Image (tube, rainbow, N blue to C red):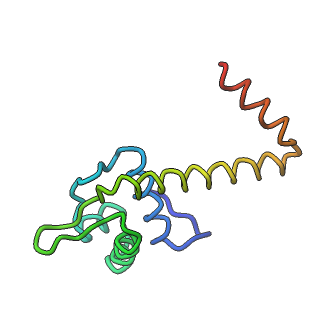
């Protein structure tokens, strides 16, 4: 994974994991790799990975079971809310970028309609 200088690495890792959860790369109830293994996979400092995992746990997306490991939450409502939040963020970003190019909302909607037909 390539990291951007525009945001803290732990937030970028969290975003990557959230997208994996929403897209099905990590399924509800699935065991998550150890923090050490994740740090190695992402090529980041162990403390940075611990912070990302702690925040994911605080948000209720990962649940740690003492002596067993960490797992993706099976809370369907929480997962649906995450999916909606990520979709809203992408939509807002897209609309803002289209507006910056000079597109009106009507032109943007027409463009999406046209692209959807192809």
Residue at 31%, 65% in the rendered image: 62
Q: Image check: 101 left or right of 83? A: right
Q: Quadrant of the C terminus?
A: top right
Q: Quadrant of the N terminus?
A: bottom left
- Give the residue furthest to the top: 118
Q: List x then y, in percent, for residue 27.
A: 29, 48
Residue at 49%, 65% in the rendered image: 12
Number of callouts: 0
The quadrant holding residue 103 is top right
Q: Image check: 83 left or right of 67? A: right
Q: Image check: 88 left or right of 22? A: right
Q: List x then y, in percent, for residue 44.
A: 38, 70
Residue at 24%, 61% in the rendered image: 71
- Give the residue furthest to the bottom: 47
Q: List x then y, in percent, for residue 111.
A: 77, 30
- Give the residue furthest to the front: 77
Q: List x then y, in percent, for residue 19.
A: 45, 52
Q: Image check: 6 left or right of 50? A: right
In this view, 15 is above or below 65: above
Query: Is 78 in front, or is 57?
Result: 78
Query: Is 8 in front, or is 79?
Result: 79
In this view, 94 is above or below 55: above
Residue at 39%, 72% in the rendered image: 52
């Amino acid at each position: 994974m390539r990291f951007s200088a525009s945001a803290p690495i732990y937030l970028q890792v969290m975003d990557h994991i959230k997208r994996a959860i929403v897209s099905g790369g990590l399924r509800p109830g699935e065991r998550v790799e150890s923090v050490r293994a994740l740090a190695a996979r992402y090529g980041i400092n162990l403390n940075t990975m611990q912070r990302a995992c702690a925040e994911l746990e605080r948000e209720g997306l990962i649940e740690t079971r003492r002596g067993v490991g960490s797992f993706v939450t099976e809370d369907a409502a929480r997962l649906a809310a995450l999916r909606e939040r990520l979709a809203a963020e992408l939509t807002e970003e897209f609309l803002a970028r289209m507006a910056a190019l000079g597109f009106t909302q009507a032109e943007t909607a027409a463009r999406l309609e046209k692209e959807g037909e192809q």
